[in-house]
Structure formats: structure tokens, C-alpha cells
Image (cartoon, helix red, strand yellow):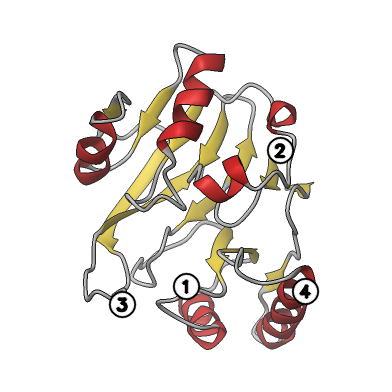
Amino acid sequence: MATIRRLTDSAVLVTTDHHVTLFDPGFHTFTSGELDLTEIGDVTRVLITHEHGDHASPDFINWLIGRRSDLVVYSNPRVAEVLESAGVQVSTEVPADVIVEDVLHERIASGATPPNRAFTIDGLFTHPGDSRQPTTTAPVLALPLIAPWDSATGAVEFARRLRPRQVIPVHDFYLSKAGRDWVANMVKGVLAGHGIELVPLDWGEGYTV
């Protein structure tokens, strides 16, 4: 049994019998004031998909380390290089219960496609970061819905290709509450026709798998 809780944007907290894993602690969650961060509990490890600040906030990560000095941060070599200047030590090793797929971030406005590490933990949950390139998923997939590099149509195509049992919406901070609900409900209706359930978690909401 595990609990999946969405914080804001792409930050997701997954609690299992062995770990409390925080994916992509970006600045939206840390600075928006939308959540009381002291309520997220005792995070035991952090997994970061790529270097962008909306997924990897040095201030947020250092705040987490200040709460637990033995916290381990895992990511790819590029993230390790970027965060080193902020005094954050990043391990590029892969924990025993984690599967990674190293792909590329989708092309952004500058034309760049940074390295992106998709993570799957406990055979349960996959966070693809900002990439539609992963080839496999666990039963539950974090699905980026709206981004400068893609659309809700791309999200549907990605989910249909990987065919998870469930998806949870991520990467929609730029929308109002009404906008987030509207896009999630639209995608939910389309995916239901393909046997994929969208679990409509808004900020701070969670459920037990």
C-alpha cells in the first residue's frame, strides 16, 4: 500500500513502507504559499528528473536537507553539476527499488533538449519529468498536462502509448483552479475511453493505491 500526494505543479510525494520520496521539488511548491510545507512530513529521499528550477529548486532542497541531514538527493549527472554550486550533493546512482530511463526533455523555446531522467519506484509509480520519450511506465503515471513544450493533446497521446492503469495530472501551475479542473476533466474523459483512469488530484490532495 502506498499514498500518492500531489504538492503543486510537478512535485509529487509518494509514501511507501520503506520511503517517503519527493519527486521534483520545484520553486512553485516552495515559494507559492499554496501549501504548508511543514505538513509534508519526513521526506527520506528526493528524486529529480532534470535541472529546471520548476523541478529542482536549490532553496527548497536545502530546506529539506535542513530538516533531515541524511536526506539523499538522486538525479542525473547534469543536475548534480548544476546543484553543486548551491552546495547540494546529488547522487547519480540508482537505488535498488528504482528504475530509471534516461531520455531528453522535450524541445523548449531556446531549442534546447536537456537530459531528463524518468523514475519508476516500487513498480508502482512513474514520474517522466518533462519528456514524452519514456517507453515504459508503472501502473500509476504522473502525466504532464500543460507545458510550454507540449499540449493536452500530447499528454493524451503519451498516456495512450504507455497505457498505465491510472494517471495523475502534473505540470499545470500556469492555469487557474478552474483551468486546471477543465483540462483535467477533458483529458479524463478521453482517457477513460482507452481504459485509463485519471485521478484528479489538485494541489495538496492525495490518495491511497
Mark 3 residue type:
Ala
Judge whether 145 appears above or below 173 on screen.
below
Which circle, 3 or 2, is nearer the viewer?
3
The x, y position of residue 28, in whole percent, is 57, 50
Seen from the viewer's position, the closer of residues 67 and 199 is: 67
Q: First in sequence: mark 3 or mark 2?
A: 2
Q: First in sequence: mark 3 or mark 4?
A: 3
Dot 1 corresponds to which residue? 162
Mark 2 residue type:
Met
Dot 2 corresponds to which residue? 1
Contact between marks 2 and 4 (CB within 8 A): the answer is no
Mark 1 residue type:
Leu
Dot 4 corresponds to which residue? 181
Q: CA distance from mark 1 to mark 4?
A: 23 Å
Whether residue 93 is visible, yes or no, is no
Seen from the viewer's position, the closer of residues 50 and 137 is: 50
Instruction: Tell me the crowding category of disc 1: few under 14, some 14 to 19, or many 20 or more residues within 10 angstroms, Cα based.
Output: some
Contact between marks 3 and 4 (CB within 8 A): the answer is no
Contact between marks 1 and 4 (CB within 8 A): the answer is no
The x, y position of residue 69, in whole percent, is 46, 11
The x, y position of residue 6, in whole percent, is 67, 50
Q: State the image quarter where residue 192 is shown.
A: bottom right
Dot 3 corresponds to which residue? 109
Q: Quadrant of the N terminus?
A: top right
